[in-house]
Image (spheres, rainbow, N blue to C red):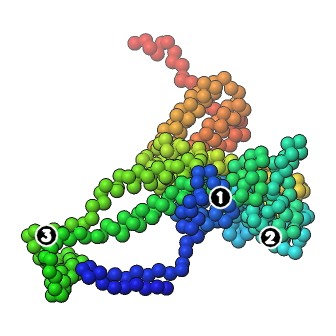
Amino acid sequence: MAVNSGVDNGASAYLSTTNGLSSSLLDLLVADEIVPGTDPSYQICKIIYSYHPLGAKMAESPIGMAQSQERDISIPGAPEDDLKLAFRNEWDKTGVIGADVIIYNLMKTSRIYGIASLVAGVKDFPTNEPLPWDRLHEADMYYNIIDPLNSAGSLVLNQDPNAPDFQKPTYLKVASKDYHPSRAVIMMNEQPIYIQWSNSAFGFVGRSVYQRALFPLKSFVQSMITDDAVTQKAAILVAKLKSPGSIIDSVTRAFYQFKRQSIKGAKTGNVLSIGTDENIESIDLKNIRDAAEFARENILKNIATSANMPASMLNQETLAEGFGEGSEDAKQIARYIDRLRIEMGPAYQFMDDIVMRRAWNADYYKTIQRRYPGQYGKVPYETAFYQWKNAFKATWPNLLKEPDSELVKVDDIIMKAAIGTVEVLAPMLDPSNKATLAVWLADVMNDRKMMFSSPLLLDEEAIAQYVPPEPEKEPEVPPEAYET
């Protein structure tokens, strides 16, 4: 380290330090070799994610927003509450960190480099054999995220347009170990382009989210340097002092140096004396503001456009009306997240199959048989499991949530339509169908949880057998009773 110090014979002492430290991000992104269209390498993508202020946000924020809501799970025709509870308990403890975090890491890695793989392993079990599904609940399982450096060579993808595996990942090999297709799910960020090599992924595969945005990401670093320079200059005070004359002795020099030090050390509450012809003011940086803000805003828009993301997700701007009001920005973000959820589907399907087999195992099924003997007492485990598995459905809720006031209005319209249907059909139906209609109306009411907090339960059989009492006839009065 070198230290330089001295006095400028008319200014305050200065001290500067330099050392041998360097910044990988600055070295790469300020390089003149990076121009529009430069293809980022594996190492550049890693550095951007690790150090660039927008690196992690571009890779992670869309996934976090997509997973901000839990999926709505339904298993019709089954003991739904019991199965959902067992499934969610196993889902949350899968791989110790939970299945949501595992999928999050898979999608994040694929966005950073262009491709990533999730492998499910069983301790002391060969990786090239299928998972032991019948013993999965007893297995000591682990889940690893494989980045393209570890899978390089096995995920290049076939470029023969006549081949069945044309541009499709067919096998995974990591450190000389083959993985059975049932043990892995491969996720690409965007689809491969014919004979288009991705440096960051070591294959003809997807592309990093930074690929198109590399040059504006470099410009963003330049804007940070500008911010730092403005911050350093903002506290400068310019003192316009009267010249002491052509002949300056040591006493005069010491006086003016003392005066500058007094200006530098002045604080709120101090009294500072200067001459009538002298002036003190801060450096004028107001002309920089418009240009700097304009450039920074355009850089963020360019990055968002390059990454095919809504600009508001990068700008961290508060939506004018929020998601509940359905503003245009909110709708744009919701459409983007809906598409991302579709892309995440294979990863969720992969984890769903494993979690279902571990949660609804043969031992758990004995509990279900004891709890529901009439329905499952004589049903084999495999039969019941595949019935549940085939009926399993998980859907994402709408990211745009309507306010409660609007939901109540919708429920009111639905209830009026249901009541009108009952009033029209009831006079034309026999007692059995009238009972079915009454139970249907009760189900419609029970679905309106914003209006009715307690469910309405009706006995369909009792309603069908019910005979309303006939009204008593008034006694007949003989005509002579009216005679006077």
Q: Secondary structure at mark 1?
A: loop
Q: Amino acid at mark 1?
A: Pro
Q: Is residue 406 visible?
A: yes
Which quarter of the picture shows residue 194? top right
Please say if the residues under marks 2 and 1 sit with CB atoms less than 8 Å apart.
no
Q: Which mark is residue 314?
A: none
Residue that carries the numbered disc 1 in the rendered image: 40
Which quarter of the picture shows residue 116? bottom right
Residue for point 49% across, 12% down: 479
Q: Which mark is residue 141?
A: 2
Q: Secondary structure at mark 3?
A: loop
Q: Position of residue 209 (x, y in %)?
A: 63, 54
Foreground mark, 3 or 2?
3
Q: In front here: 115 or 62?
A: 115
Decide: is 420 above or below 484: below
Q: Position of residue 309 (x, y in %)?
A: 57, 49
Q: Amino acid at mark 3?
A: Glu
Q: Position of residue 381 (x, y in %)?
A: 87, 58
Decide: is 295 above or below 466: below
Residue that carries the numbered disc 3 in the rendered image: 278
Please say if the residues under marks 3 and 1 sit with CB atoms less than 8 Å apart.
no
Image-based side of 379 in relation to 144, left or right: right
Q: Residues within 10 Å of mark 3 (few under 14, many from 20)?
A: few
Q: Residues within 10 Å of mark 2 (few under 14, many from 20)?
A: some
Residue for point 89% across, 71% down: 125
